Structures are given as C-alpha cells and as structure tokens.
Image (tube, grey):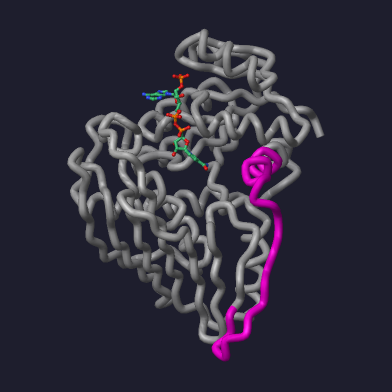
Amino acid sequence: MKKLNWAILGPGRIASEFADAVHAAGKTIYAVGSRRLEHANDFAGKHHIEKAYGNYDEMLRDPAIDIVYLSTPHSNHYEYLMKCLENGKNVICEKAITVSTEQLRPVIQLAKEKHLFVVEAMTIFHMPLYQKLQEIVASGKIGKLKMVNVTFGSLKPYDPKSRFFNMDLAGGALLDIGTYALSFARFFLSSQPNQIVTTVKKFETGADESSGIVLKNPDDQMGVITLTMRAKLPKRGIVTGDKAFITVDNFPRAENATLTYPDGSTEEISAGDTDRAMAYEYVYMNQVVAGARQENTLPLTSDVVDIMTRVRHQWGINYPFE
Ligand SMILES: NC(=O)c1ccc[n+]([C@@H]2O[C@H](COP(=O)([O-])OP(=O)(O)OC[C@H]3O[C@@H](n4cnc5c(N)ncnc54)[C@H](OP(=O)(O)O)[C@@H]3O)[C@@H](O)[C@H]2O)c1
C-alpha cells in the first residue's frame, strides 16, 4: 500500500494524543499546521513531525499531503473541511464533524465531486469491539432489539471561555459528549429515528448543560440518552433485546462488554485494545484512501448530525456563527 502523508490541522490536546498513537504504532506524521509558527514548531519537535506550518492555509497548499487530521474546535470544522477538500485533501475530522446538517451536506457534496474521503474520527465506528457486538446483535443472540440506553456525564470546571461552554466555539454537552452517546445508539438501532422527545437545562452561556433525549425509529426501537456536563455519570451504553442485554462501560473507547441473560448469567465479550483507539482510526483512514476498504461510516455520522440538529432546534439553541 502506497505510503500516505498525514498532516495535523489544529494541534491541541486531542491532536497530541493522536500524534502519540501514530508514533506508538511505528508510523510518522508528515506535517502540522497551527495558527502560530512557534506552536507548530514546538508540536513538530515533540511528535517527530517533519514539517511545521504557522498558517493552516499555507499547509493545505502543500501538494505532498494526502490526509488531514482536523482537530480544531467544532465551530470551525466546516470551514476547514471545505478548505481541505478544495485543496484536494482527504480528511478525518474530530467529533462533532459539523454543528449541523446544513453544514455537513455541502461537505459531503464537495467530497463526492472531488472523489475524496471525509470520515469522522468517531472512535465507536472504528473500535474492533463494535464490529464484534454488531455481529452478535445480527446473530439474534439478544433477540429482537428493543432499546438502547446511554448515559454520559462529565464534570468540567466551569470556564465560559473554554470550548465546552462557549457558544462561539459551539459549546455544550450535545456536541461534545452527546455525539458519542448518539453514535452508540444509532450504531445499534436498525434505522434512523423519526421521533424525538427531549428536554434541556442550559448553562449560563446558553449552551446545553444537561438533557434527556428519547428517540424512536420506524421499527419501534427506542433510544434513551442522558447527558450532563455538570455531574459525573458512567459512560455506559446498554443494548437490549427480548432475549438478553449487552452492557458496554466506558463505551467511547471500549474493549470489553458483558452479555446478560434474563436468568442473570453472563458472558464476557472482548475485542481490540482501548489504548489503540486512535490508531484504529489512523489505520482505517489509510485503508479507505488507499482503496483497500470499502465500508463507509459517513451515513451513520450524517444520521447522528441530523439527530443533533433536530434536538438543538427543539431547544432553540443557535450558535452565533450559524
Ligand atoms: N476523539 C476524542 O477522544 C476527542 C477528545 C477530545 C476532543 N475531541 C475533539 O477534538 C476537537 C479539539 O478538541 P481539543 O480538546 O483538542 O481542543 P483544544 O485543546 O482546544 O485544541 C484545539 C486546537 O484547535 C486550534 N484552533 C483553531 N481555531 C481555534 C479557535 N477558534 N479556538 C481555539 N482553538 C482553535 C488550536 O490550535 P492552534 O492555536 O495551534 O492553531 C487548538 O490547539 C474538538 O472537536 C473535540 O470535540 C475529540
């Protein structure tokens, strides 16, 4: 397989983790782009990266770059997704890929026109455990799928300027952690929900703090999602059918799950490695771009963005840049 040159755009906390994961896998990243050359140089030095750019646009004009890992806050994913594609780059973008369906639609269209790949760095879609769980559900072992229940609560120190709370940076629980919960739910539900009932409590900034979201699809399967950014809740996903249920703890990067039968007996299911969560995304993207893998996770991403868009409309939350 041809070696593809990777670049990081937006070298923050998660980009650092990504670069470490690639390095640990014995691979290299070719370039990094920051809004400040000093920061780019510093990041490049720490992560064994050949080229450092102090300007995103300048980096995107480098013809040697094949794939961009986009890791700015969600508020400007759309702008840089479009720029990556306009410059002929494939792109794997951190969650939430865009803040709305209105933003995602032209991205998908442009990628199609340019014959480029756009993928969301949604760990759930790339962790081996989920392929295994999907096979178990498809085999009928849990019976007819009835419900998916997901909880995710994160206790962040309140800072109205940070991307978690700041409306200018598309803050709020829905786009930061809700995207994982909804991706988990949508991954197992057999069709896209057409009914959504929800309620929200907002932060002082106007971003969503805590919410309950109930989904139902045309197959009468339900999803129940509980989110908060002001209290800890287990990151737990439960998929239940009329014969058994599956529990996945720490679901965004899980390597283990438990199958529980109505009599209380259990079976452990394991696959993959939590520590390699980001390396799986790197491998997946290389294979997709090289034409060695055909599956496409973008329809699932698109369904999740669509649910988040509808939920946010119900809450009356609009970001200033929309
Ligand atoms: N997959 C995961 O497990 C995971 C975990 C955490 C976060 N994320 C996602 O990754 C993205 C980045 O999160 P993060 O926690 O890494 O954020 P972060 O530490 O704040 O880093 C974001 C980087 O984006 C660049 N940037 C460009 N425009 C910016 C702006 N207007 N304000 C602030 N920074 C800007 C900055 O780089 P320069 O200043 O150098 O240009 C900054 O270092 C988010 O979409 C988030 O949801 C994913």
Q: Is residue 80 above or below residue 104?
A: above
Q: Is residue 322 visible?
A: no
What residue is drawn where x is 25% and y is 33%? 160
User: Residue 68 or 205: which is nearer the viewer?
Assistant: 205
Q: Is residue 230 magenta?
A: no
User: Residue 215 or 289: which is nearer the viewer?
Assistant: 215
Image region (quadrant) for ligand 1: top left
Q: Is residue 24 visible?
A: yes
Picture quarter with the C terminus: top left
Q: Is residue 277 magenta?
A: yes
Which portion, as a residue range, is magenta? 260-284
- 143 vs 224, left or right, is right
Q: Residue furthest right?
A: 1
Picture quarter with the N terminus: top right
What residue is drawn where x is 51% and y is 14%? 39
Image location of residue 3, percent across then percent down = 77, 28
What residue is drawn where x is 53% and y is 82%? 144
Determine the image quadrant of residue 73: top left
Image location of residue 13, percent across then percent down = 50, 31
Q: Is residue 109 above or below residue 192?
A: above
Image location of residue 107, percent across then percent down = 45, 35
Image location of residue 164, percent across then percent down = 34, 38
User: Residue 53 or 233: which is nearer the viewer?
Assistant: 233
- 234 vs 122, left or right, is left
